Image (tube, rainbow, N blue to C red):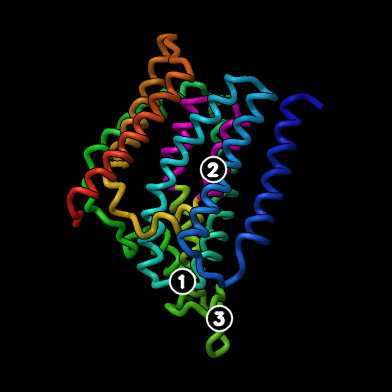
Amino acid sequence: MNSSQITYLTFATVLVLAIIFDLGLLSKKGAIFTMRKALYQTIFWVSLALAFFAFLWYEDGHKIALEYLSAYLMEWSLSIDNIFVFILIFVYFKVKEKYVARVLLIGILLAIVLRILFITAGIVLINQFHWLLYIFGGILVYTGISMFLAKKDDELDIEKNKVYRLLRRVLPLTHEDGDGKFSIRRNGKKYYTSLFVVVILLATTDIVFAVDSIPAVFGITQNRLVIYTSNIFAVLGLRSLFFLLQGAVNKFIYLQQGIAVVLVFIGLKMLVEYFDIRIPILVSLMIILTCIATSIAYSMIRANKEPVN
């Protein structure tokens, strides 16, 4: 068994055990998530991701380990923006607190499956058509600039969501939550509940965000092990982050700009490689860390100084 196979096997084993631990010991069906519990679970998932970083350093060397850490930090920061959209979805459908944790978990697990398919397709395409990296780079620069200039007041309009409109057109939906069920029967006819719709919207919303984040991770590395593991660890931490941040949406008002700068940097990094200019992974890591930390710190300072409307 070679080093890569050992790493994959270790990751799969840790992942399965962590999910069992999360579901069996840290979570119970219908349980209400407290801020303390959310903090413990966030620490658990972040610690696990960092432990895997240490394992990669030992097993595969510092270069791959630093690529993984850079990719994970970028995906983790992007997931915070993802969470704010999740919060709007739960508010819109008035999901009862006792169902939130289970719906989030199912939506996130479905998102992981979709991301794996999305990443696999991306790897195949880039192996066949390497010039796609430069197109991805241009898209990231454009997306980053647009994100930096976008107004924070723009809110998600669920009624205009294409997936939601498609679901309403092809499936019989009900506004009921079905007491936690995803489908119910009324007068002999099957209806899909609001919880079913929320799960689908969570998974597809994550994929929309992945349209930016997955090309960006290709700008950091083309190592498929790093791409898969950094994405999965970041997405698995979404549920605890949701409960940790749901009361602090307005405290991260400048995170969007920090993420935007990261996307522009990674896009430019991909483009300059055409001229055989390689930016060291340690430099990339420091820029990503600086942008994220600075935007979060500045957001919290401003939030404490003045009320945010």
What's the CA distance linking mark 1 and mark 3?
Answer: 20 Å
Residue where numbered disc 1 is placed: 97
Name the residue at 58% across, 54% down.
109
Q: Is residue 287 magenta?
A: no
Which residue has dot 2 on it? Answer: 46
Q: Residue 252's x, y, as percent?
A: 31, 47
Could you tell whether 17 is left or right of 207 in the image? right
- Which of labels 1 and 3 is toward the front? 1
Q: Where 188 sits versus 204, above or below? A: below
In percent of width and height, residue 72 lies at 51, 35
Q: Residues within 10 Å of mark 1 (few under 14, many from 20)?
A: few
SS for callout 1: helix
Please report whichever mark, 3 or 2, sits nearer to the chain's N-terminal start.
Answer: 2
Using a 10 Å C-alpha cutoff, classify the residue at mark 2 as few (fewer than 14 neighbours), some (14 to 19) or many (20 or more). some
Closer to us: mark 2 or mark 1? 2
**Magenta-colored span:** 208-237
Disc number placed over residue 184 in the picture, else none: 3
Work out whether residue 296 or residue 229 is closer to the camera in this orientation and state it: 296
Q: Position of residue 92 (x, y in %)?
A: 35, 68
Instruction: Using the rendered view, name the quadrant where residue 139 is placed.
Output: top left
Q: Secondary structure at mark 3?
A: strand
Spatial CA distance of label 2 from label 1 is: 24 Å
Q: CA distance from mark 3 to mark 2?
A: 38 Å
Total numbered circles: 3
